[in-house]
Amino acid sequence: MNELELLRKKIDEIDTKLCELFENRMEIAKAIGQYKKEHNLDILDASREEIVLNKAKKRIKNKDLEEYYLKLVVYLMDLSKKYQND
């Protein structure tokens, strides 16, 4: 196996883990959405989203990747809200 194949294999392994984490996150998001519906709460909670983004900024160690990571977090929150509404 050459270097490129090894690197791609590592990406595949990471993608498998990301998929598992994504499924878990979305299941929890669905449960949160159900709770909000049962308690007549809005799906959008802007203050919570701000908290999540602030935590994300503190969490990322490589500041060169911060912009990309924050975009990922925003996208995940958008997907979660959509899934909660489905």
Image (cartoon, rainbow, N blue to C red):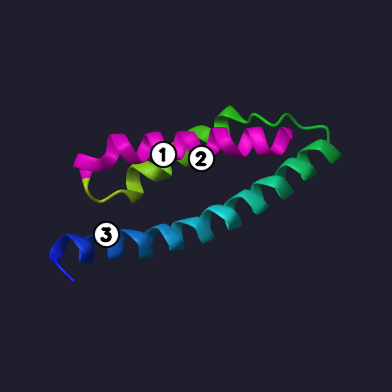
Mark 2 = which residue?
76
State yes or no: discs 1 and 3 in contact (Cβ < 8 Å): no
- In the rendered image, residue 56, in percent from the top left (x then y), is placed at 39, 44
| Residue numbers of the magenta segment | 63-86
Q: Which residue is tagged 1? A: 72
- Name the side, left or right, on which 40 lies relative to 20: right
Quadrant in the picture for residue 18 = bottom left
Q: Amino acid at mark 3?
A: Arg
For badge 2, the amino acid type reads Leu
Are circles 1 and 2 on residues that touch, CB within 8 Å? yes
Question: Which quadrant, please, contains the N terminus?
Answer: bottom left
Looking at this view, is 2 or 16 the one in front? 2
First reached walking from the N terminus: tag 2 or tag 3:
3
* 42 or 26: nearer the viewer: 26
Reading the image, the residue beneath label 3 is 8
- Left or right, residue 73 beside residue 31: left
Quadrant the C terminus occupies: top right
**In the depicted view, which residue is nearer to us: 28 or 5?**
5
Residue at image x 73%, y 41%?
33
- Type of amino acid under label 1: Leu
Q: Is residue 63 above or below residue 42?
A: below
Q: Which sits earlier in the primary sequence, circle 1 or circle 3? A: 3
Camera-near label (2 vs 3) is 3
Residue 49: image x %, image y %?
A: 53, 34
Q: Image quadrant of residue 78? A: top right
Q: Residue furthest right?
A: 38
Query: Which class describes the residues within 10 Å of circle 2: few (<14), some (14-19), or many (20+)?
Result: some
What SS does tag 3 mark?
helix
Quadrant in the picture for residue 72 = top left
